[in-house]
Image (tube, rainbow, N blue to C red):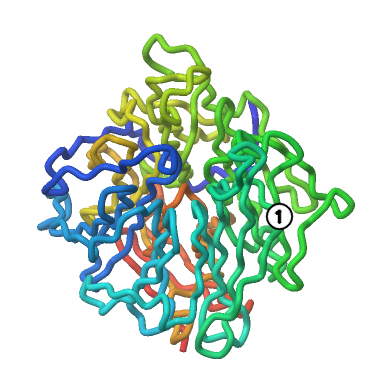
Amino acid sequence: MIRLGLVLSLVAGAAAAEPRFEPRPDAFGLEHAYTGGWEHFVGGGVAVLDCNGDARPDVVAAGGTSPLRLFVNTTEAPGAAIRFAPRKLSGITETTGAYPLDIDGDGALDLVVLRVGPNMLLRSDGQCGFTDATEAWGLSPRDAWTTAFSATWEKGQDLPMLAFGNYVDRNDPDGPFEACDVNALYRPKTDTYAAPEILDPGYCALSMLISDWQRSGTPELRISNDRHYYVRGGFEEMWRLDPLSPRTEEDGWRKVSLWGMGIASADITGDGRPEVMLTSMGDQLLQFNEGDAWRNAPYEVGAAAQRPYQGDDGRPSTGWHAEFGDVDNDGLLDLFIAKGNVDQMPSNAMRDPNNLLMQQPDGTFAEVGGAAGIGDDARSRGAALADFDGDGRLDLLVHARRAPLKLWQNVTEGVGNWVAVEPRMSGPNTRAVGAWVELRQGDTVHAREVTVGGGHAGGQAGPLHFGLGDAETAEVRVTWPDGTKGDWQEIRAGQVLRPTRD
């Protein structure tokens, strides 16, 4: 038996639930797809945010050559069929993804829009209306092919630091192979953004995430890169932010090369440090965070998801968005992976179903995607696990290339109890980016970080969801971005807690 250091008291006595999802083909009111040619083989992200303050998650979906679209959640009640009302966002096209972020600290979630072309910052009016504020906030984006993003707040700043990851340099006459573009970091200068700091060389970034990986109080930027275009010489990267410098083999950074598509992070071993899941073509790579090193998970852990689990196509899979979430509320984080061929790549599976890997009490993962009803084999890209109907069960949203945006409602019976926690602060960092939320039951503590970035071209802003198993109560504590620890406070099952720090 493989043990990952998990403490199992959270799930002792919890009823086993078999995950089941119901497709909602009419959820969005119209058919929306991520379209386009070569420049939209990658991307196709979704942003999940509450854009009007009604505590129901809304959706922004990239369109590629189709318009970027907003879908406002109109679901009538917990457990009711999930429904959205579609809206066009000013006819914005050539989008690859989007991330929610309260840029100006007014409490409303704005949007960072990634594009094939100049990126955009959209200011929210708090009622799901958005206007272009790119120039007003002083961002000077290049005409690049942007496919990755992350952000955080540095001490004393009124605006967040923004990191953009760029893919192939379309203007390189010797490209596309070995023609990866550089990446860019924008730091605020008073109330606008200064000229970008360049992260060079670039290795065709497809996902990036700023996190306090070692729980030292010093966040760093991890970048996942696509070796299909850097071909040789490139690798997965970790950058110190202050001063800006890459980690090297001399200070313990092990060079790993893969077809990096997406990043997901979560503490699944119970030691308080986040593990990382890196999607790729072929094997997906789960790495355990051991503080001074990253250890590749052995095959027996069951997270490699290297080939389709159904159908007769035995060629390697292609992974994109990955996300951890407790689908059955048993207290153990499960893992979703969006799968799909780049386009017509003959070396990889053409019909490649999405994965739902359920974490077992011994720390291994078991595939249930087909049985759960989410084994769609479209060319999936971005995705999100979120409670769209407010019933305490995580639903599934998946965006695909040249296929309709889809939603599956979680109708699993016999799930455990749950809570959700959404820390808030007075401006500028109203959503407490960089905070850690700990949930304690007995000697078991689960830690989650509030981050912006990761996934594949899209992410979420909203409550952090915790499964409780059969437990009725737990204790919650927030470690705020400056390292100050709040008090433990009790939270009851079914409660959404929003601890606030002035």
Q: Which residue sits at x=33%, y=38%?
A: 400
365 or 56: nearer the eye?
56
Percent of width and height locating residue 193: 54, 80
Dividing the picture into quadrants, the one containing residue 38 is: top left
Q: Which residue sits at x=33%, y=58%?
A: 48
Residue found farthest to the right: 250
Percent of width and height locating residue 214: 71, 59
Residue found farthest to the front: 173
Q: Which residue sits at x=14%, y=51%?
A: 83
Dividing the picture into quadrants, the one containing residue 496 is: bottom left
Q: Which residue is mark 1?
A: 238
Q: Which residue sits at x=57%, y=42%?
A: 277
> Is residue 476 visible in this depiction of the protein?
yes
Q: Is residue 131 above or below residue 116?
A: below
Percent of width and height locating residue 25: 15, 38
18 or 204: nearer the eye?
204
Q: Is residue 198 above or below residue 319?
A: below
Dividing the picture into quadrants, the one containing residue 284 is: top right
388 or 8: nearer the eye?
388
> Is residue 413 visible in this depiction of the protein?
no
Q: Is residue 124 left or right of residue 424?
A: left
The local crowd at label 1, few if under 14, some if 14 to 19, many if 20 or more residues have their Cα within 10 Å, is many
Dot 1: element: strand
Which quadrant is home to the N terminus?
top right
71 or 372: nearer the eye?
71
- What type is the residue that disc 1 sits on? Met
Percent of width and height locating residue 245: 77, 64
Q: Is residue 266 left or right of residue 418?
A: right
